[in-house]
Image (cartoon, grey):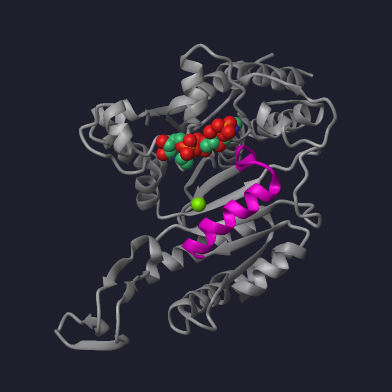
Amino acid sequence: MSKIEMKTPLVEMNGDEMTRILWQMIKEELLLPYVNLKTEYYDLGLAKRNETNDQITVDAANATKKYGVAVKCATITPNAARMEEYDLKEMWKSPNGTIRAILDGTVFRAPIIVKGIEPNVRSWKKPITLARHAYGDVYKNMEMVIPGPGKVELVYTAEDGTETRELVHNFVGPGVAQGMHNLDNSIESFARSCFNFALDTKQDLWFATKDTISKKYDHHFKDIFQKIYEEEFQAKFKAAGITYFYTLIDDAVARVMKAEGGFIWACKNYDGDVMSDMVSSAFGSLAMMTSVLVSPQGYYEYEAAHGTVQKHYYKHLKGEETSTNSVATIFAWTGALKKRGELDQIPELIEFGENLEKATVETIENGKMTKDLALITSLENPTVLNSRDFILAVKETLEK
Ligand code: NAP
Ligand code: MG
């Protein structure tokens, strides 16, 4: 059987720990035998980031701008313990944060639905995709502990020196205060990414904020979405037979719990952080969650939603057997290959991606899975496989 040829390289970003081990296995067993894999390789493993003063991360993000599609392995975000473990020159920033800042994107996360891993919410039949704005609000805030009586104000000083003031609170005793911001540019690209992703995947788009209480801040998000929808997307949505729907965040939460799924739920940064954990755990497992960063210019970066699975890696280093779930990492590769196939018009590559996804799902539905899933499946007597054997079981299904 001849291998599938690619035209444009994928930007391949390798990562750390257990996911780096899975990365290699997936390439060897599930990709290289079938695809003449063309990639531009960037090693985002922590050692290489340290060696290059993190330039490798910036280069990888810029390569994504050049080629359009990237696939990324989970990476360590250094903390104090990692400084010592890897003898780091600096506490390098989160690679995802660096890449996001360069590509200016929105993160879309969707569960991988498998029979036998039932959502805890009975009405959910189709995936719910969460779109999280990844800039500003409480993540770029400034906070203050107020020790005692006094006045807290918001002051905007224009470039010509004129000041506009709003009283936050006249404190008569101790308390706390917080200031935060967002940018029209960033909200606009968030909106465009969401509308484009809805068109791309032919799903309705929901957006919700707390605009009844936050009459300026949250209302601004609502207005920007509405304006961009009317000016750029309304006609396209109509033609695609999908809808855009804005509601209050409370109402959205209530509706989501009663819905069937099959839509995209756009959330502000904090709502998206919290709600994506709720949605993903209610669907079963973080290891069954895909994640893609979509930029308003149409660059795509695919990854798994989970981290580097450090505990499993330490077991692996000690020579102990691991049963780490590779599904989300496999789907990161298939997502990227399918997108490359679509952009370069290579139907065999799209078909290969789809078949590999089907084989992965079918393997689990046939009762072969890793330990994390075996613990929650409704299938009787599942076969628990180790990390490599699961990948080999997927390969066997794929070959069939
Ligand atoms: P994690 O890697 O997501 O793992 C947390 C726990 O979740 C694991 O110990 C494991 O539970 C379970 N788990 C996660 N993925 C799994 C999988 N594929 N198969 C089976 N079980 C899985 O989070 P972490 O341990 O908090 O973080 C480790 C490193 O990852 C950190 O350095 C962090 O900075 C990094 N991180 C990277 C990304 C990213 O690159 N996107 C995202 C998050 C975290 P059991 O131990 O109970 O089996
Ligand atoms: Mg979170």
The answer to whether residue 223 is seen in the rendering is: yes
Residue 375 shown in magenta = no
Which residue occupies the foreground of this view, 393 or 350?
393
Please report the residue visible at 55 percent of the width from the left and 21 percent of the height from the top.
27
Image quarter where the C terminus lies is: top right
The answer to whether residue 128 is above or below residue 304 is below
Please report the residue visible at 73 percent of the width from the left and 63 percent of the height from the top.
257
Residue 6 image offset from top left, x and y in percent: 55, 28
Which residue occupies the foreground of this view, 346 or 309?
309
Total residue callouts: 0
Residue 382 image offset from top left, x and y in percent: 79, 25
Which residue occupies the foreground of this view, 369 or 355?
369
Residue found at the very far left of the displayed protein: 161
The answer to whether residue 99 is above or below residue 2 is below
Residue 115 image offset from top left, x and y in percent: 81, 39
Please report the residue visible at 33 percent of the width from the left and 73 percent of the height from the top.
176
User: Quadrant location of residue 371?
Assistant: top right
Residue 76 image offset from top left, x and y in percent: 39, 35
Image position of 268 (left or right of 42): right
Residue found at the very far right of the displayed protein: 380
User: Quadrant location of residue 355?
Assistant: top right
Image position of 29 (left or right of 164): right
Q: Main secondary structure of the magenta part?
A: helix
Image position of 334 (left or right of 365): left
Residue found at the very far top of the displayed protein: 319
The answer to whether residue 329 is seen in the rendering is: no
> Which residues are drawn in magenta?
268-289
